[in-house]
């Protein structure tokens, strides 16, 4: 509860360019957002991109002995995406961001104002969590691109960089996908 209060307080201090409209988050919108990852200031650009769509992005570190990676919530009609950066890696930032945005797109509503996530928890198998995981994965690297990519098989740096260049995303995202798929 204390963490949520801190997040909402930060979110309310953000200047959003517009009011969020249902249907803003499309596959194309998510792919455009993912392309910001290739820039050094990608996370800051993501915050601006979301603000331009009426979504507040807040980073609030997790409290000790908690395993929170992020949350999606509604404050009145304003979606808030909160990330903890518990795993301070670019691939984790972008995956957690996309995961929470899928929750905003598909699951947040007046009957469910808050969804918290520990992305390391292997027991989370609800339909909502599976949709958010798959949606995030495909927003970053579309399934048809992953299936035909050489890096899926070779796991080589060269092939990871080649796929990242093709998709115009940061190579860390491809490396994170390889790490996740290989379980290593």
Image (cartoon, helix red, strand yellow):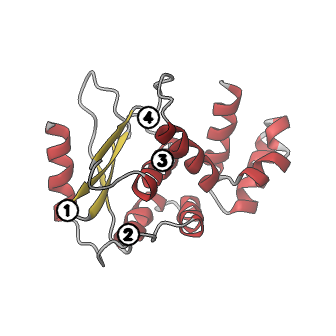
- Crowding at dot 4, Cα within 10 Å, few <14 / some 14-19 / many 20+, comes out as few
Closer to the eye: label 2 or 3 = 3
Quadrant of the image occupied by residue 63: top left
- Label 1: element kind: loop
| Residue in the image at 16% along x and 64% along y | 13
| Residue 162 placement, left or right of 1 | right
Closer to the N terminus: mark 1 or mark 4? 1
Closer to the eye: label 1 or 2 = 1
Q: Which residue lies furthest to the bottom in this view?
A: 18
Q: Do the numbered discs 1 and 4 sit on residues whose CB atoms are within 8 Å?
A: no
Residue 65's x, y, as percent?
Answer: 27, 21
Q: Measure the C-alpha gap from mark 3 to mark 4.
A: 15 Å
Quadrant of the image occupied by residue 152: top right
Closer to the N terminus: mark 4 or mark 2? 2
| Residue in the image at 51% along x and 29% along y | 125
Q: Measure the C-alpha gap from mark 1 to mark 4.
A: 30 Å
Q: In which quarter of the image is the C terminus?
A: top right
Q: Read off the residue under disc 1.
A: 76
Residue 114's x, y, as percent?
Answer: 28, 45
Q: Read off the residue under disc 4.
A: 87
Q: Quadrant of the N terminus?
A: top left
Residue 99 image label: 3
Q: Measure the C-alpha gap from mark 1 to mark 2.
A: 20 Å
Closer to the N terminus: mark 3 or mark 1? 1
- Label 4: element kind: loop
Q: Measure the C-alpha gap from mark 4 to mark 2.
A: 22 Å
Closer to the N terminus: mark 2 or mark 3? 2
| Residue 107 placement, left or right of 27 | left
Closer to the N terminus: mark 3 or mark 4? 4
* Relative depth, front residue between 68 and 111: 111
| Residue 36 placement, left or right of 113 | right
């Amino acid at each position: 509860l204390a963490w949520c209060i801190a997040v909402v307080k930060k979110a309310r201090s953000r200047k959003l360019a517009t009011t969020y409209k249902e249907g803003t988050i499309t596959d194309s919108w998510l792919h455009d957002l993912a392309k910001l990852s290739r820039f050094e200031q990608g996370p800051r650009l993501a915050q601006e991109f979301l603000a331009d769509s009426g979504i507040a992005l807040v980073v609030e570190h997790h409290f000790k002995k908690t395993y929170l990676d992020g949350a999606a919530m509604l404050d009145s009609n304003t979606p808030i995406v909160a990330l903890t950066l518990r795993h301070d890696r670019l691939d984790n930032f972008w995956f957690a961001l996309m995961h929470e945005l899928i929750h905003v797109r598909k699951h947040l509503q007046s009957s469910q104002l808050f969804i918290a996530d520990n992305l390391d928890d292997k027991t989370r198998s609800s339909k909502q969590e599976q949709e958010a995981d798959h949606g995030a994965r495909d927003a970053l690297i579309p399934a048809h691109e992953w299936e035909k990519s050489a890096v899926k098989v070779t796991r080589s740096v060269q092939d990871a960089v080649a796929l990242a260049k093709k998709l115009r995303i940061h190579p860390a995202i491809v490396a994170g996908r390889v790490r996740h798929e290989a379980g290593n």
